[in-house]
Image (tube, grey):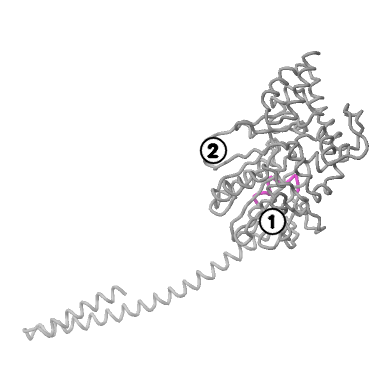
Amino acid sequence: VDEIKGVDQVMADVEQEISQAQDPNMKPVLIMKQTKLEGEKQQLAAREKRLRGDKKQLGVRERQLRDKKAKLREEMKEKKQAAFTWTESEARLDGMGFCKEEKYFRLDCSYLRGTNVNSGEQLLLYCRKAFLEQFRFLREQVLEHGALGWIQGSPGTGKTTTTLSFCMTLDRNEWSFKCIRLKARSNTCVVEVTGNKRRTCSVAKESEGEQMKLLLEGLLDGKKSLLVLDGYLTHQESHTRALVACIGWRDADRQNRRLVVVTSMASRGKTYDEEDRELGLKEHIVPSWRIDEYLEAVQFDEFYNQVAPSLEMNVTGEILSLEMTTGSKSKQQRVRHKHYLAGGSCRYMFDMTAAEVLRCLDLALESAPNLRNLLRGHAGVSSEDITNRLIASTVTQQTVVWFPVSKYVASNLAASRGAVDTLRKMWTSCSGQRDLCGHLLEMLFFEEVR
């Protein structure tokens, strides 16, 4: 086109020269030049027409290739996902959320079990201060600022249920969420919610590390996504590979993707500040439950009726070396009796019977090296045994303090040799747990006398 415009300009100049020519011999020369330029113009016009035709054909070819590429990508995606059997259902999120002046939260139990079976059963959660603080961390640090969230705390603090509850409150028009629940021995469960639809699948334990990247590639996109990696343990090699895959998924589109890791490990172990800065990693510690939180939680009759069977002390006081009142008991009495066993674990308090908790703790006590090693963390950041069932934690002046999960555990661990120094250190460091401090002081007295 530009060449044609150039020829037109030259022809205009020639025409002007012809009209102004004084020399009769010069006029024929200019006319011949004009004729030649008209021929060049016709050739350029024909060339332009051919190029426009070629461009149109290339556009058609480009669209065909683009469609073919999209089809191949979809076929590859379907082929990759053939290894995963997905079950789809309605998300059923409308019945979940805060209630009772936002002091409690309703959660569909099927999300915790990783199933699509709608039993209609809901879990009523008490929104203690730590529950709301974890919500704030997820909203501000993870969603708004794009941090890689790292949520850790002792077993039974409510980390998983709180994280899932937060996912239920997301704006479904803007966010989708996926939860990958890693297990120590059984298969990994995956739950994905987009809009009003939910789908679940199971990944074989022996192949979860290799298939995790494949699984993430097949997760639905199209809007902002929050991915929860729950149950992470460093000593599980497949968990480490899963974490690497999840970080890669998040880093591929940090603007629209968010990642949260939930773990019961005592700490992350050796950390590297530069790597944490590159990842944008932010930690959040969830403290263990306090007796006053239990007592407040059972004030709501619906909640109390839900947990009442677990508060029944179906073990004798002789077994626990504990004097218990007989006859009918108030809510407060039942909570205080169970607290001797359950301590800072709401799982022990509200989800398991006293007999089940006792078996669990006694089995863990057999694995515990001794009080000093356990509380110093010598059982390992990510313990391969079950000793982490014995510990609880609190945060005092931005420092995490570890202590026995309950009075029953503390009494049994205190019998270990060399316990006095550790007991004294624990007693001075856990000032926030008044009930436990009194018991530790009593233990310290008898240890020193002995």
Q: Position of residue 46 (x, y in %)?
A: 35, 80
Vertical comparison of 263 with 40: above or below = above
Q: Main secondary structure of the magenta part?
A: helix
Residue 120: say if magenta: no
* Residue 275: image tag: 2
Q: Position of residue 274 (x, y in %)?
A: 52, 36
- If the image is split into quadrants, where does the N terminus sit? bottom left
Query: Would residue 175 be found to the left or right of residue 122 on screen?
Result: left
- If the image is split into quadrants, where does the C terminus sit? top right
Residue under label 1, please give it.
192
Frontmost residue, 208 versus 189: 189
> Which amino acid type is shown beneath numbered disc 1?
Glu
Vertical comparison of 63 with 346: above or below = below
Residue at the image position 65 percent from the left and 46 percent from the top: 132
Vertical comparison of 5 with 258: above or below = below
Callout 1: SS? strand
Q: Which residues are magenta?
A: 204-213
> Which amino acid type is shown beneath numbered disc 2?
Glu
